[in-house]
Image (cartoon, rainbow, N blue to C red):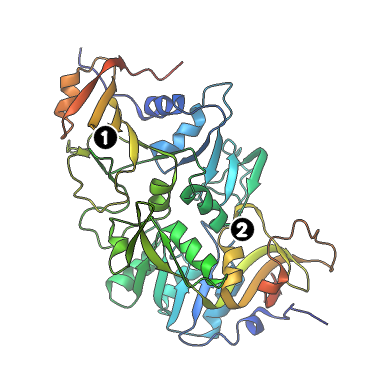
Amino acid sequence: MIPTPLTKEQLARRVALDLRDGQYVNLGFGIPTEVSNYVPPGREVVFHIENGALGLGPAPAPGQEDPELVNAGEQPVTLLPGASLFHHADSFAMTRGHHVDIAVLGAMQVSERGDLANWKVKGADLGGIGGAMDIALGVKRLFVAMLHTTNRGEYKIVKQLDYPVTGLACVKRIFTDMAVIDVTPDGLLLREVAPGFSVEAVQQVTEPRLTVAPDIQTIRWTL
Amino acid sequence: MINKIVASVDEAVADIFDGATVLFGGFGGAGEPQELFAALLRQGAKNLVGVSNSIGKGDKGLAVLIGEGRIGKMICSFPLIKGGEAFQQQYRAGRIALETTPQGTLAERIRAGGSGIAAFYTPTGVGTEMAEGKELREFDGVPCLLEKAIKGDFALIRARCADRWGNLVYAKTGRNFNPIMAMAAKVTIAEVDEIVELGELDPETIVTPGIFVQRVIKRGRA
């Protein structure tokens, strides 16, 4: 049987397992946004949005949307009891000032040193940087959640970025639909592979050499 | 007697001059001063330097000012968004200049501008195209860029409620850049939903003290 990579939902669920009780977390666009739906029961995780709120709740019921309460992707959101609101400079003091524990961002490319490219397509004249550069360098721990390769099968985990840089040496852990990989001072450490995939299969779609963790495991996305 | 409440939105923006630097509050549709945008369009000032998180979208607000060729330069963090074609057309035709700034750096540059801080060092942007032409200096082993403060001639902002002293409170994520822009402009004009009597706003919960606000206009008085 040919193994299948994780779905985006399974990938979001796997990332959510790494969020701990009491952590403050910022989520980027795309797959990262979905992570908030899958925090394991019994863990209180406080989600931060760059446009000025801590303590995001679930999406509002249809008809209950408030145009004055949106996330960074302009989608309507809700606030949980205990939430707080603040202006943009305070919001970015939280990320730039190392107060946010974890950020999960999408990526176009990640290098073996943990360099991140996620704001501008190679060769494009315009790109929306938004808060990505501030968040990449300012949070305590940066995760990337992305598909392992481009839809044309090109490497996204590369030796050297050739897309415009968002931040240097900032990514600590990479979650893909095929693997969980840590960025370490000694290079990339393969910690988990998707069910049915071999280490060789993951290496084949990863440009830099992977070191295999002695306790390598199969990815699970439920407790 | 202090009374910052202005009778009409057109009067509120009447002295915005050609070439002025104008800070525009709002993020993702929340906290955008739509009536002030419309009044500025009617007023006619041109060659403005606009400072805002994005370049506006669709057929209202900042996107219309840009589409009408009234903005000569934008300083923003999101020049590329869905619905932002007005800016992209002007930019690709060479009719508008652009300074892209990381969002946190943008917020801090504005906060600095309102706080008497000329410039500051930040690691954000080191090793990226944002570093081009900026001083690089290391602090405790961390390379940082020198970023200059942003000050406005005017700020057009949106709040939920004001009193005649210009004290303001906001609505949820409609707060965003509005309080720091109020601090960073010579003339801050606040578009509000409601005006209350002095003393009705709890001093403990006022977000923008009136010292930062010069004019207040109630929505629906255009």
Horizontal and vertical percent for residue B3? Answer: 78, 79
Residue B30, located in which quarter of the rendered image?
bottom right
Horizontal and vertical percent for residue B18? Answer: 47, 87
Is residue A149 depicted above or below B17 in this figure? above
Chain letter of the residue carrying label 1: A
Is residue B125 depicted above or below B158 in this figure? above
Q: Could you tell me which secondary element the residue under label 1 belongs to?
A: loop
Instruction: In this rendered view, identify the residue nearer to me: A180 or B45.
Output: A180
* Residue indicated by mark 1: A185
Horizontal and vertical percent for residue A195? Answer: 29, 16
Horizontal and vertical percent for residue B43? Answer: 55, 84
Q: Residues within 10 Å of mark 1 (few under 14, many from 20)?
A: few
Disc 1 from disc 2: Cα separation: 41 Å
Instruction: In this rendered view, identify the residue nearer to me: A8 or A163.
Output: A163
Disc 2 marks a residue whose amino acid type is: Arg
Image-based side of A63 in relation to B89, left or right: right
- Residue A192 seen in this snapshot: yes
Disc 1 marks a residue whose amino acid type is: Pro
Image-based side of A53 in relation to A29, left or right: right
Q: Identify the residue at horizontal 34%, vertical 26% (top origin).
A: A7
Q: Furthest-top residue in view? A: A1
Q: Which mark is residue B175?
A: 2
- Mark 1 vs mark 2, foreground winner is 1
- Residue A178 seen in this snapshot: no
- The answer to whether marks 1 and 2 mark residues whose Cβ atoms lie closer than 8 Å is no
Q: Residues within 10 Å of mark 2 (few under 14, many from 20)?
A: many
The N terminus of chain A: image quadrant: top left
Instruction: In this rendered view, identify the residue nearer to me: A97 or B151.
Output: A97
Tally the marks: 2
